[in-house]
Amino acid sequence: MQLPESYVFFSQPKINSGKNALEHIYVELASMDARKPLVLASRQVAEQGLTKKFIKSLYDSNVIIGSLYEEVYPYHYACISQLNDLAELFRARGCDSIIAIGGGSVVDLAKGVNIAVSNEGSVMDYAGENVLRKRLKPFVYVSTGQCGGTETSNEAYIENRRFVSDFLFPDVIVLDNRMITSLTRQRAAEAAMVALTAAIESCAVPYNNPMNDLYANVAINFIYENLHGVVKKPKITHGNLALANAYAMAGIAFSNIPPGIVYSLGIAIARDTGLPRGKCMGCLLPLSLEYRVMKHESIRSELLYALLGIEGYCRVPEKDRTQTSIAILRQFVNDLGDILPKSLKDMHVSRYKFEEYSRMASEMSKKRVSQQDCMQLLDIAWEGIA
Amino acid sequence: MNIDRYPEIPPKNKFIKKAYVAIMLWIVGRAMQAASRVDSVVKEEFSHLRDNFLLRLWVAPNGPSMFVGKDKNGKVKYMGWNPRGKKTTLDMQIKGIEQAVLMFTFQESTARATSNDRLIVSGDLDDACSVVRILDIVEVFLLPKIITSLAVKRYPKWSQMSPLRKYIGRILVYIRAFTV
Amino acid sequence: MVMKEITGTSNKILEVDLTTQKFSVFDIPEKDRKMYLGGKGLGLKLLYDRMAVGVDPLGPDNIIAFMMGVLMGTGASCSGRFAAVTKSPLTGIMTSASCGGPFGMALKTSGWDGLLIKGKSAKPVYLYIDSKGVQFRDAKTIWGKEIRKAQDVVLKEGSGAVVIGPAGENLVRFANICSGHRFLGRGGMGAVLGAKNLKAVVAKGQEYKILPVKSKKFEKTKKRSTKYINQNPITSNQYRIFGTNSHVMLSNKAGILPVRNFTGGSHGEAAKVSGERIVAKHNPKFSTCKPCTILCGHKATFNGEERSVPEFETTGLFGPNLEIFDPNAISDFNEICTDMGMDTISAGGTIAWAMEATEKGLFKSDLKFGSPKEVAQTLTDIGKAKGIGKELGMGSRWLSKKYGGEDFAMHVKGLEIAAYDPRGAFGQGLSFAVANRGGCHLSSAFFSLEAYLHMYQPYTTWGKASYTEFAENCFDVVNSLHICQFTAFPVFLEPPIIKMLPTVVLNISLSTMAPLAIWFMDLSVWSRYWSSVTGHRLNMWKMLKIGKRIHVLERYMNTREGIARKDDTLPGRLLNEGRVSDPKHRTVPLEKMLPKYYKVRGYDENGIPRDRTLRKLKIEKK
C-alpha cells in the first residue's frame, strides 16, 4: 500500500458491537455528560418489540429516558413538522441527548432534531455542506439492520434537502444482536446494495486514502461473505450482525468522499420513481465498473483484495485483477436471483427521464460525475449489458 | 403536540440480578480473604501489593460492590460493601448489571470481559494484573473445572496446581469463607 | 342544409400525424367495439395497440385520443359528453378525462367517432375537421391567446372546438383543454397539445344525423332514464337548483371539507361559499352541456359580471382549502384558470402546498393562507410560466420532491386529490389510492355514499374494497358509452326495489353481498342505451365485465410504466395526522383495505394484474 501525497480522513463515531452492546449506552452517555436522552423509533421498530428491549437494557442505570417517541413516519425522509414537534418535546422534557433506533428516516429525523435543539433559527437554514458551526448534543445510533445509507455518515436528508457536516456523525453506534432484526430477502439485498455501493465508490477513487480503504474494504468483505447466507436464511444472527457492521463502516467511508456516480444516480431515480434505493444501485453498480473499464479508467486492485481476502487476491495475476473483481461482483449480484432487477427496463424506469436523472446526479455529486457519464451509464443500464 | 402522551421513563431495577451479583461478590470477597490465608501463591501475590491496598470491585452505577484490602496489620480482609470512609487504591468497575451477570454466570472470563470493554480499571496496572491472577486462583478453588474453565483465561495444569493443593485449598477456602 | 344519416355509429376514426401533416382513416374493428364499447374504453385500447411503453408524454410519440362514444349525437339524456385519453405529463401514466361542451357533437356530426393525434408540428397549427377529413391551418394569429379569445376565433369555422390556453402552450403540467364552457381537466392534456404545437381542433359539425339502430328500444330507454333523473332528488333538485356547490355544506357537516391544505374537515364560514348562498346572493341561471336533463351547470353574477359558477372542486380547493371564504374571489380564480386553461383542482392543490411550504420555510413565495390577492397573480404567473409560476406549474409532486413537504403535498401518483378529505370517508381514501389516473374522486365517487347518502359507515373498512371495484367498473362503462356520471345517482337509487328497501338492508347488502345488491339497481338502462344504438346485444352483466376489462387494461398499461403497490398510497398527512376538527384524530387505514382490493381485482400483492386475470378478461399481454 502506498502512502499518498496527502489525504484527509475523519470519523467521529465510537462503535460498540456484539453481545450486550446496548448496556454500554449509559456509560457512553455519562462520558458525554448526558443522562436524559430523547429516544426516537419508528412504528415498525415499536411493533417488533425492539423499544421494549431497549428500555430494559437501561434498567439499573442512572439514565432516565426523557421521552420515547415511536411514531416516526415510515417514509424515507424526515419532515419539518414532525421535527419541530420533537424539538419542542426535547426542550419541554429537559433532554440532553438523542438516541435513534431504526433506519434512515429515524436517523435523519434525529439528526434534524439535534440541529434544531443545538442551534438558533430554522433547521432548513443549515441545509447544505458544512454550514453547521457548533457541536451538537450527544447522539447515539442503535442499528436495527436497516440501511438507508446515511445513518452512520455525516449527512442527513431533511425535507429532501441534503445536510452535510462532520457534526452530524453519531457519537456512538451500537450494534447489538438483540436489536438487529431479520429483514425480508428483498429488503436485506436492497440494504446491502446501498452499503456496497457506498463502500466500493468510496475506495474506487483514483487516488487512495488508506483510512477510507480500511473501512471500505472491511465493509465490502463483510457484505460479500454474509449477504447470500442472510438472503437464504434471514434469521441468521451472526450474518445480520456482520452486515450491520458493514453498513456502519460503509457509512463512515462514504462520508469522506463526495457521492459517486452510482450512489447519486440511485438516489435520483429512487426519489423520482419511489423505487427502493438499493434496487436502483444494485442494478447500476456492476455495470458502472464495466463502464469505467470501457472508458479505460483504472479500478484499484484493492477491490479484489476486499472481496477475496489475501489468499484469493494473491492467486490472481496482476493483469487480471480488475476483470476478475468485476466478474466476481457481477456474479455476486446475479446469484441473488430475481431479488434485484438486472436492467432499468425491468424496473420500468422511463427512458425519457434519463437527462433529468443525470442532471440531478451531477449536481448531487458536486460535478464529480459528469452528466455525460451518467447518461451513458443509464443507457447501458437500460438493457443491462455493458 | 401533546407532550403528555410521551412521558419520562425512569429506569426500573433488576432486583434478582442485583441480588445474585451481590451474593457472588460477597462470596468472592470472602473467598479472597480465605485464600490469602490458605494458599501460598495467593499469599505471595498479596504480599507484593502495597500496605494500604484496597480493591473495590463494583457494578456501576449503583450496583453491589465488594471491598478487599489489607488492614493495619497487613492482613488481607474482606471489608464489606459500603464505600463510606474507605480509600480505594484499585477500582475495578463493571459497567453495568448485565455485564456483571455475564461475568458471574461465567459466560465471560475476567480477561475476556476486559477486552470486551466491560470493565473499567483505575489504579496501578501491576496491582490490577495481580488481582486478576488472584481472582483466577480463587475461582479454581470455588468452582468445578467445567465452570472454571469458562471463567478463567487458562485453567492451571497439574504442574501449576496439583490436585492435592486444589482440593485441600477448596475445602479450606469454603470453610473459612462461610464460617469465620 | 340536408343532413346525411348515420345509423348506429360511423365506426370511423381519424388518425392525424402532425409531424408529416397527414391524416388517415381507419375503421374500429367490431371486436374492439364490442369489447370496449367506445369512449374511454376504446380510446385506451387504441393507444394500447399503437403506443410504445415509456414514451415521453410531451414528446411526439405520445398519442392523444378524443373519443365520442356511441351515444353522442343520439339525443340520449345527458349524453353530450366525450372522452380523451393520453399519457399524462403530470403523472407519467395514462390519464383520461370526460368533457361536455360542443366539440363532441361537432366531431360526431361531422361523421367521426374519434380522433387520434400524434407527432409534433414544426409550427403552431390548428386542425379543421369536416366530413372530408382534416386540414392543417396556421395558428400564428391565435397562438398565445387566452382560451375564450382563441375559441371565439376558431368557432367561426365550426360548431365545436377544443382549444388550449397559454398554460398548455407553456407546458404547465396541469394545463387543460376547453370545449365551450367545459374542460378536459385532469392530467395536463393541455400540455400534451401544447407540446405538439397544436392550439385547437375545430369540427364543422351538423353534417350528419345520428340515429339508433333500434329506435323503439332507444326511446323506451330514454324515457325510463329521464324518469329516473327527474325522480331522483339529487339530479332533479339538488344539482338542478344549487349545482355541485351543494356539496359544500354536505361536506362541511360530514367533516370532509378540505380546510387549510387538508388540516381540517370543517369550518364555521363554509356557508359563505355554499350553493345555497350562491343561489341567494348571485342570481344563477342554467348553463349546461347539450343535451342535458340534469342541468347542473349555472352562470351567475360575480364582481358585477356574468360568469360560470365555479364547480364544487374549484370552490373547495380555492376556498376553504386556502382559507378563503369570498365567492367573488373564488370566481376570479376560476376565471383566470379558464382563460389560462388550467385544471382548478391541481392548481388549488399546488397553491395550498406552496402556502404551507412558505409558512414552513421550505419555499419562497408571497402566498399566505386566507389572502386572495397573491393567489390571483400567482395563477396568472403559472399560466404564463413566469417567476415562481414556472415551477408551480410542474405540480405539487415535483415541487415537494425538490423542496420538501412531501407529507403535505396532497396528490396521489402526481395528480392532486379532489376536495374530499378521506379521513372522514375511508372508502374514498381507498378510492383515491387505487384510482388509475391518480387522485381522482370520480373513479368510484365513494364519498357520496359514505358522507352524503349514509349508505356506508364512513369510519369502517368493511365492504369498501368490493364496492370500490364495482363502482370503478361502472364508471368506466359510463365513460365509455359515453354518458354523464351524474346519471349514476338515479340509476343506482331510483329502481323500485332500491326505493322500497329499508336503508339498513341496503347498506348491509352493499357491504357484504355486492353482486346481490347490483341486481337491485337498474344498470340495464346503460346497456340498453348502448345496444339500442349499435344494434349489438349487451346485458348488464356483460357490460360490467367490459367495465372491469377497461379498468384492468388501464391498470396494466400503468404497471408497464412502473406503477405498483408503492404508488397506491395517500399523502402522509392523510395516513399519519388526524383532522384538527376530529377529536379522535382518525387517519385512513389504507393497509387494511388495499390487500382486499387487490384480491377482488385479481392483482398480485404488488398490485400487478395477474396473468390469469388478463386472460379471463381477454387482454392480450404486450
Image (spheres, coloured by chain):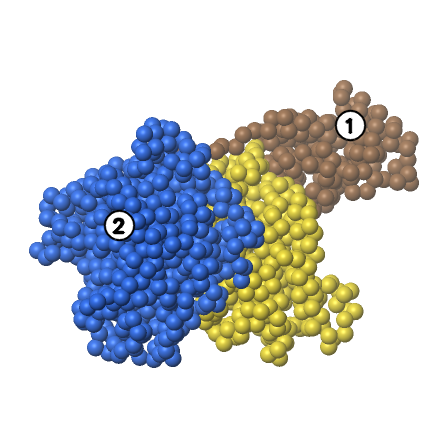
Which hue belongs to chain B? brown
Mark 2 surroundings: few (<14), some (14-19) or many (≥20) residues within 10 A: many
- Quadrant housing residue A194: bottom right
> On the image, numbered disc 1 is attached to which residue?
B34
Looking at the image, the residue that sits furthest to the top is B179
Out of C608 and C314, give the one closest to the viewer. Answer: C608
Q: CA distance from mark 2 to mark 1?
A: 107 Å
Q: Which chain is yellow?
A: A
Q: What's the residue type where badge 1 is placed? A: Ala
Q: Residue at left 63%, top 76%?
A: A293
The picture places residue A160, in percent across and down from the top left corner, at 42, 58
Could you say where residue A314 lies in the image, as x and y percent from the top left? Answer: 77, 69
Residue at 73% in and 30% down: B28
Chain in blue in the render: C
Where residue C263 appears, as percent x and y from the top left, is 31, 44
- Which residue carries the number 2 mark? C77
Identified by mark 2, the residue type is: Ser
| Of the two numbered discs 2 and 1 in the rendering, the one whose residue sits closer to the viewer | 2
Q: Position of residue A125 (x, y in %)?
A: 36, 58
- Disc 2 chain ID: C
Vertical order, B101 against C76 (above or below): above
Looking at the image, how many numbered discs can be counted on the residues?
2
**Residues beneath discs 2 and 1 located on the same chain:** no
